[in-house]
Image (cartoon, rainbow, N blue to C red):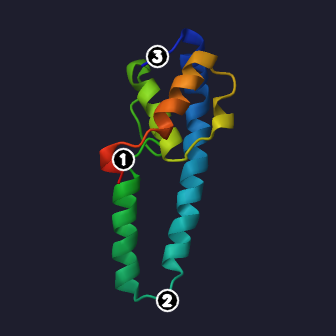
Amino acid sequence: MVELSKKDWKLFQERIGDWQEAHMEKLNKEYVELLSGDEPASKKFWALEERIRSDKNTPGVRLNLRKSEAYWDLVDLMRRKVISEEDLDGFSEKLKEHILIRAEYRFPEDD
């Protein structure tokens, strides 16, 4: 793990709100699509409730803004495709390299 520099931490704090807002916009579109389906209303309702319950605890929606957790938050954001490699522009090269390596690694619970 790489510790975030003051510059990286500040940049993370500046960008996280926009990243989350864009991710939630994407989720909202997915919810509308889910609700627009041909299934019975009750099925759509419960499917939406399950999706929101699952989505609301991801870093793309909610996270504890702590410097000590920011490295792993960045890894998780990359792995969940909330952010892309281009979103890491401006961060230190060492941090970007480590984030990209960790984000590509598949953990057993991912399968």
Check disc 2 and report the residue beneath it.
38
Q: SS class of the residue under badge 3? A: loop
* Quadrant where the image shows the N terminus: top left
**Of the residues shown, which amino acid type is indicated by label 1?**
Asn
**Which mark, by number, is residue 2?**
3
Q: SS class of the residue under badge 2? A: loop
Mark 3 crowd level (few <14, some 14–19, many ≥20, 10 Å Cα): few
- The residue depicted at 40 percent of the width and 85 percent of the height is 41
Label 2 near label 1: C-beta < 8 Å? no
**Of the residues shown, which amino acid type is indicated by label 3?**
Val
Q: Left or right? Give the position of 102 relative to 93.
A: left
Q: Left or right? Give the position of 67 relative to 91.
A: left
> Which one is in front, 3 or 7?
3
How far from the left and from the top, in percent, is residue 38? 49, 89
Nearest-to-viewer mark from 3 and 2: 3
Question: CA–CA distance between discs 1 and 3?
Answer: 24 Å
How far from the left and from the top, in percent, is residue 21? 58, 46
* Quadrant where the image shows the C terminus: bottom left
**Which mark, by number, is residue 57?**
1
